[in-house]
Structure formats: C-alpha cells, structure tokens
Amino acid sequence: MDQAWKLLRTRLFCEKTNLVYDSLSSHAPAHRFDHMPYPEEVARHAPNPAGWGTGMEDSMLNAGSVLEACILRARFEPEHRTEALDFARRIISGMEACATVHGTPGFVARSICLRDGKSCYINSSRDQFTLFVYGLWRFFHSEFATAEERGRIARLLAEVAVYTERAVRPENGN
C-alpha cells in the first residue's frame, strides 16, 4: 500500500492541477508528463475529442477511486489520517476544477491540460460522471467532510444532476 501511495502521490499526481493523470513519459520527475498535449492540441481536439491516448482521458475515474482510497486510509490507518485527508481535499479541488473550468455548469471534463491549467477536451462519458459523483458522494457522507465541504459538494452534484437531466436523453443519442 505504501509503495502504491507513493507512486500515486509523487508520479501520477500533478500539483499544478490537483489531478491524477494516466501515464508517465519518463521516470525522471521533471519529464514525467512530457507526453501530455499542449493547449493548442486540446483546442483542435487532437488526437480526438475525448483525449484518448494523451494521458488525460481518465482523471475523473482516477479521482473518484483515489477519494475512496483516501477515506479508507484516513479511517483505518490513523497514523496517515492527516496526509490522506490533505490529499483527498486536493483531489476534490481538482474535481471541482474539472466541473467548472469550462463554464458549463454540471459538465464533468475528463481532465485539465496541465500545461495551462484550463484547457479540456469536449467529450466526457458516463463512467467519468459516475466516478466523479461516487467519489464526492463518499466524501460527503464520510466523517471527514466539513460543513463547508458538504456545501461545495452538494452544489457540484446538483449541477451535475441538472446537466445530465438535460443532456442524457434518447434524442441526444445518450
């Protein structure tokens, strides 16, 4: 567990965006994300509108799973509680950015370009939304969430509900 935690925190997590990315270019810390797309590529939807194959296609899947791991670590390993909760709060910050950076309330971007901290691909998916909701719901209902955090989470989840009621319809191909 400690080795996996260290890999997650020091290799796959980006301090700039508070997101966990999918892959590494190099084990050299300064070059670990060299393969990530540039904002211009994201704006052109290159290589595709979901960003598949870029390393930034599944940050919301990662975030929901990581939040669950943080909650469990804080609960069952009291000696790591502070570190686990600090990391959970950083992940929540990254999730909130993925739900707000684009200006469409309720849309959950898969990830954010680490080069500019704001570009995101236009395509998301049900699994991204599902793990986004799951992770936030789990933290909201944990003994660790503050009243302020519960308020932020409730707002985000309400926006997702409104967005999905509007967007997920047979006539939209969903």
Image (cartoon, rainbow, N blue to C red):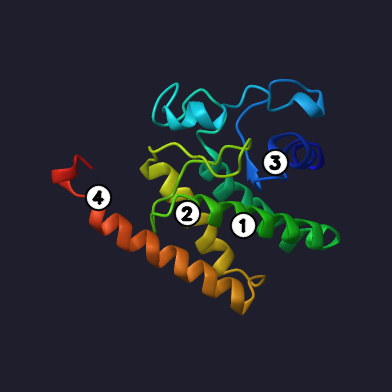
Q: Residues within 10 Å of mark 2 (few under 14, many from 20)?
A: many
Question: What residue is pinned by disc 1?
Answer: 93
Label 2 secondary element: helix
Q: Earlier in the sequence, mark 4 or mark 1?
A: 1
- Image check: 6 left or right of 118? right
Numbered label tally: 4
Helix, strand or loop at label 4? It is: loop
Q: In the rendering, at what x and y percent does residue 88 appear?
A: 67, 57
Task: Find residue 90 and report its horizontal and vertical position in percent.
Answer: 68, 55
- Local SS, label 1: helix
**Which mark sits nearer the N-terminus, 2 or 3?**
3
Image marks 4 and 3: residues in contact by CB distance under 8 Å: no
| Mark number displayed over residue 168 | 4
Q: Position of residue 171 (x, y in %)?
A: 13, 45
Q: Which mark is residue 162?
A: none
Q: Residues within 10 Å of mark 1 (few under 14, many from 20)?
A: some
**Left of 46 or right of it: where is 63?**
right
Which of labels 4 and 2 is toward the front? Answer: 2
